[in-house]
Structure formats: structure tokens, C-alpha cells
Image (cartoon, grey):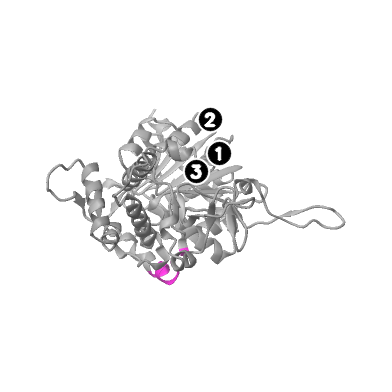
Amino acid sequence: MEENKLFDSKVNKAFFGNTDKLAEWLKTDDDNQEKALERIKLLIKNYLELDNVSFLFGSGSSIYLGSVSIRNFPVEVEEHIKTKGNEISAEFTKTIKHLQNIKTDNDIIRDGTEIKIEYEKVLNYLIAKDFTLDEENAERKDNIKELIIAIKEGLFSVCNINNRDIPKDKIKEEYYDSVKENKYHFHEKFIKALLQRPLNLKRANIFTLNYDLAFEYAFDKLGVFYIDGFAGFHKRYFKPETFEYDMFYPGSTTAGKVQRIEKVIRYFKLHGSISWINSDKRDANNLYGIEELPIALIEKSNKKGDMIIYPSAVKKSYTLDFPYSELFRQFASTISHSQSVLVTVGYAFADEHINDIIFQALSNPSFTLIILAYNSNPEIERIKKLNDSRIIILEGNYLGDFIVFADKIMPDFYDLKINEKVAKTLYDYFENDNTKSNKRNEEL
């Protein structure tokens, strides 16, 4: 790649519908990638000034922090299971072979650091089998309950990113030192940019499918209030009514007006969290038996096996139960409002239930979907083929990277020179258009 190039234009694309506008812009701007990036930044700024702005984050936004992709079953979790003894390990092997349809003495099918079977499928199968065996009221000699606990404990470890090393092969070299110095630097940078939206707009919404606490750590570092469905201080219990709360300064004694607190974000963990556990005590303050605890306390009290996560590949039974029914209802309701934009980051569109909600939102003519995709896949290609101009796909190892998005593409609403940049971009755009028009007229 040439020295003055920011990215490889052969692999980075900006699709509007199924048309790569980036290629057109680079031709118009004499292959000037800085100008093309400014156009994308201005585009994002315009959409972030809509009243209803939501982000959906998948594993691609945490992988550079040392988290692992858990679409397929991580070998690291298998290694943890082996430490629990031969009986539990044998139960696991039997389960995987059944799900992989291995009827011989052949080994489990692996692919590098993963077992070739969906993580959710394994846990869903075990939970369903455990429920069925309990209903039969027969004397049980299996180790399924213990295996489920072991799997959750292993998952806790691979998602506890505060204790994970930063993988050099998952992060661009120029960003490594920043992340090494402050692991959540780019999560913080993204949040700070998002909070610069005009105060007359609705609160921004962050939805995440990740179990880790990257955003929570970033919120705490910045002193940002986040409404996540839990209430309390020493004891934090799930109370869905808090999603409808907001935060204001007390009113003036003379004017009686209240002032909106600036640094507030609505935050939804659609698949649960390593900080959520089943709570035995239920009372008026804890109707749903779901408690949020600090990570250190969960480890100290050995409650990792009580972690509440969303394991179901089948989905139906789990989305009908709390807290997931409320979380998915909030997601569907939020993105279905008029003049809404949803930006997906690091999400591979592998969750059918999430996809159904997003595609339902597309029935609203004013809804816009912006996808940041590091790599394309069959699902994203299928979305391209819809050729819908309301769907924008920023694709590639630069435009689809969360760090680049936080560092280069998220607009700075406080930048005093933003108006100058906007004017210059528009001037250059129309000047080029006029030049092309004049050439066509001369040819005629």
C-alpha cells in the first residue's frame, strides 16, 4: 500500500444499497482517501443528529481486548471443563459427539481455538435435557447440571476481559500502545463522541450482545450514568421500569425548571452479562430474582456458575422469560420509532431473533440501518442484495473496524472547524460535479 493511503480500497467498501459509493468518491476526488473519509464522517454525523439513535455491538467490538468469539465453542472453555474431573469431562465429550453426529471413536471436530459446534447450541441442548430429566422425576446419574455450571465458569473466564492479555494479532499496530496504556481507550473515545449529540435529542441507546464489561468499565472511567434496567446501590436488582427513567438536576426555586444531566446513556445487554446472577432471595425489591454483582465478589463467592446469560439457539422459551422478554421488547420498540437509525458494530447477523427485529424495523420507511462489517459473510451479502438505499454497509479491515470507527469516523460535534470542513467537502463535491458536467457539455 502506498505511504499516503489510509486503507486498501480493494477490500474497503461503502455500500449504499448494493452500490459501492466509496469507489465513486475516490474516482471523483482523485483517489483522495482523506476526502472520502470526511464524507463518511459527515454522513455519520447527520444520522447521529436524528432523534432516535441506537448502536448494536457484537463480539467484533471486544475481540481486540482479549475476548474470544463464542459463536463456536471455545477450546479454552473445554480446558476448564477438563479441570472438573473425568465424569464431567466425559459428559461434555458425549454431548459434543452427539451434537456433531459422531458415532465412532473419532475425536471431536475442532477448528483452531474452537470446537466446530455453536456454543449456544451446546448450552441450549444441555439446559433442555436437564429440564426434561427433572420433569421425569427419575433418579439421575448424569452430570449435566455440573457440566452447565462448568461451562458458565469457563465462559466467565474468557469474557472477563480485565484479566485477559491484549492479542497483538487482533489489533492494528498503530493502535496497540494506546490500548496497552488504557485497555478501554477506544470504548471511552466512542462514548465521549456519542455524548456530544445535541441535548435536545433523545438519549442514545447502546445495545450489546457481549457478556463482557468493556462498556461498563468505560462508563465508570468517564463518570457516565447508564440506565441498564437495574436499581439499587449495595444490592442491585433487575427492575425493567428503570428503562423509562431519566436523570435531571433539581429545578430552580424561582423558575421551577429542571436541567437535563448530559452524560447519560441507555444501555441494554440483550444476551445477559457475566455480572448478572440468579438471586435466591425474592421480595418486593427483587421480583425477578436477578442481581448484578461486582466481578470480584462473584469470583470470591464462587457464583460464576449462577451467571445469567442467553444460551438459546432456539430462542423462543428464553425470549418469553425475564429478563430477555423485556430486553428484546425494548430493542424492538426503540428501533421502530420514526426517524430511527441503528448502527451495528462487530455483529455478523448470525442471530435470527435479532435479525427478525431489525428487518421488521425496515418496514418503517424512515428507518436507516448502518452496518460496520470487518468481514463480509453470506448474511451480509444477502442484505446487500436487498438493494435498499436505507441500508449502508461500511465494509473492510479499516472501515469495518471498531477502533477505526471510534478514532476516525465518529464525528466531533464540538470541533470548531466542523462547519468549515462541511463547507469544504460540499464545495469540493459540487465543484467536481460541475467540472464533470462542463466536460460532458463540451463533448456534446
Give neighbour class at mark 3: few <14, some 14-19, many 20+ (Cα, 10 Å). Answer: many
Q: Is residue 336 above or below residue 288?
A: above
Predominant SS along the magenta part:
helix
Look at the numbered disc 1 and give the secondary structure of its residue.
strand
| 149 displayed left or right of 369 | left
**What amino acid does circle 1 point to?**
Ser
Indicate the position of residue 90 as horizontal and vertical percent values.
Answer: 22, 54
Any magenta on residue 11? no
| Disc number for residue 364 | 2
Q: Nearer the viewer, residue 2 or 152?
A: 152
State the count of labels. 3
- Dot placed on the residue nearer the N-terminal end, 1 or 2: 1
Q: Is residue 41 left or right of residue 88?
A: right
Which amino acid type is shown beneath numbered disc 2?
A: Asn
Direction from residue 105 to residue 14 in the image, left or right: right
Discs 1, 2 touching: Cβ within 8 Å:
yes
Residue plotted at (38% across, 34% down): 383
Judged by depth in the image, the label closer to the viewer, 2 or 3, is 3
* Disc 3 target residue: 324
The residue singled out by tag 1 in the image is 340
Residue 223 visible in the snapshot: yes
**Residue extent of the magenta highlight:** 177-185
